[in-house]
């Protein structure tokens, strides 16, 4: 089916277009035109902005559900809950946990994807852990930390039918380099996280193929002018992407702007959202830990930040306000940069001819009015 979207503004990859029509053809973006052919089907979003679908590459849960619940129901519910928030693609994300729990979570994501998700689509599994170290553990359970093991990873990959696309580890772990080389060769994005590794150690892992830093500034050694540490390595290496949680709690707004200036389109906005997202303040669990959520801030009993309750679109709006970067540029840090970090930019991430037509309709306050996946409206307010 072919149709045209009429709208006030379109957030394209390299510019904002005002007015005009965007063609949608067989579920993909077509040409951008000033006038439509006679008798063309037009969907009229006058007064609205059309943006590419957001892609959350780090999300544990939302709306009372968590990937570690180990049920396909949880995965379906998360997929449904994030769609009205403008998220069309996501990576269901695990936590460090017992061998049984981790396997069960991988199985449940795989089952849910086979049953077909009705909301946001899964782009693959992100294993956050278990190969971390203690000092910056955050809400990852240190009882299950261990050295990277390629055979163990292969077992998980087999369980998932080859759908694990990203794994985070601490670069100072034994065998981290060897593991990274092998796993990177198989097309998986190796990411650095929950580590007290040195600048040199991080640099070596990037040399070995790692290409991402998880939630920059959190779960890692900070930047010191005589010891650049993990943050220094992340900021100065243009080969690597860095994730940022722009809720105003995890990173100070001015530091978020600094990171954005330094990393440019290698900065990816993520939520790291846990089950308390879209839920009231109160007590929740995250893996085996009890977490208290107050004023939207999730913390463990030891006062560590424990994921977030952030919506990705709020992260986009926050960074836009803090940095005053044009909306289309900030928006792409939540759509195109995440796609690039996983080598998926040829199919998704921006409104570009030939790509899958995942798009979000926004009102003048940047609130979501409708969301389409592959050209089909899946949510409308
Ligand atoms: Zn983490």
Image: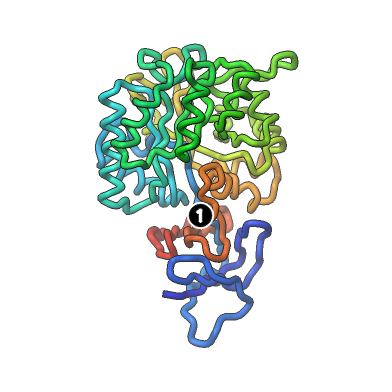
Residue in view at x 47 percent, y 75 percent: 3
Residue in view at x 39 percent, y 38 percent: 164
Residue 278 can be seen in this image? no
Residue 305 can be seen in this image? yes
Percent coordinates x, y for residue 61 in the rendering: 37, 36
The N terminus lies in quadrant: bottom left
Instruction: From the viewer's perspective, tell me whether residue 245 is left or right of residue 74.
Output: right
- Above or below, 91 against 12 in this view is above
Percent coordinates x, y for residue 156 in the rendering: 33, 32
Percent coordinates x, y for residue 368 in the rendering: 49, 54
Which residue position is annotated with label 1?
348
Label 1 SS: loop
In depth, the one of 292 and 106 nearer the eye is 106
Percent coordinates x, y for residue 95 in the rendering: 38, 27
Instruction: From the viewer's perspective, tell me whether residue 288 is left or right of residue 47.
Output: left
Instruction: From the viewer's perspective, tell me whether residue 206 is left or right of residue 236.
Output: left
């Amino acid at each position: 089916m072919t149709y045209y979207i009429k709208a006030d503004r379109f957030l394209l990859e390299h510019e904002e277009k005002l007015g005009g029509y965007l063609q949608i053809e067989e579920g993909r973006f077509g040409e951008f035109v000033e006038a439509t052919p006679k008798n063309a089907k037009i969907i009229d979003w006058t007064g609205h902005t059309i943006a590419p679908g957001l892609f959350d590459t780090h999300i544990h849960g939302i709306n009372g559900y968590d990937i570690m619940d180990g049920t396909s129901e949880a995965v379906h519910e998360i997929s449904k809950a994030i769609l009205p928030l403008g998220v069309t693609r996501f990576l269901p994300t695990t936590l460090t946990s017992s061998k049984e729990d981790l396997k069960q979570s991988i199985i449940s994501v795989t089952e849910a994807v086979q049953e077909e998700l009705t909301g946001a689509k899964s782009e693959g599994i992100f294993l956050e852990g278990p190969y971390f170290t203690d000092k910056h553990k955050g809400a990852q359970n240190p009882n299950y930390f261990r050295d990277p093991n390629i055979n163990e990873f292969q077992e998980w990959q087999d369980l998932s039918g080859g759908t694990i696309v990203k794994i985070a580890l601490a670069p100072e772990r034994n065998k981290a380099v060897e593991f990274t080389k092998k796993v990177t060769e198989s097309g998986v994005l190796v990411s650095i996280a929950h580590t007290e590794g040195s600048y040199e150690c991080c640099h070596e892992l990037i040399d070995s193929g790692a290409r991402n830093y998880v939630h920059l500034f959190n779960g890692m050694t900070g930047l010191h002018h005589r010891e650049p540490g993990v943050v220094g390595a992340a900021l100065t290496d243009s080969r690597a992407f860095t994730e940022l949680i722009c809720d105003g709690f995890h990173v100070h707004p001015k530091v978020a702007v600094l990171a954005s200036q330094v990393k440019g389109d290698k900065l990816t906005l993520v939520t790291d959202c846990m089950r308390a997202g879209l839920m009231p303040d109160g007590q929740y669990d995250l893996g085996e830990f009890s977490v208290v959520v107050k004023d939207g801030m999730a913390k463990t009993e030891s006062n560590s930040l424990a994921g977030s309750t952030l919506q990705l679109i709020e992260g986009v709006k926050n960074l836009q306000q803090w940095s005053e970067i044009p909306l289309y540029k900030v928006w792409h840090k939540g759509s195109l940069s995440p796609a690039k970090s996983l080598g998926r930019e040829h199919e998704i991430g921006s409104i570009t001819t030939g790509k899958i037509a995942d798009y979000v309709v926004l009102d003048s306050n940047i609130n979501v009015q409708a969301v389409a996946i592959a050209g089909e409206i899946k949510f409308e307010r």
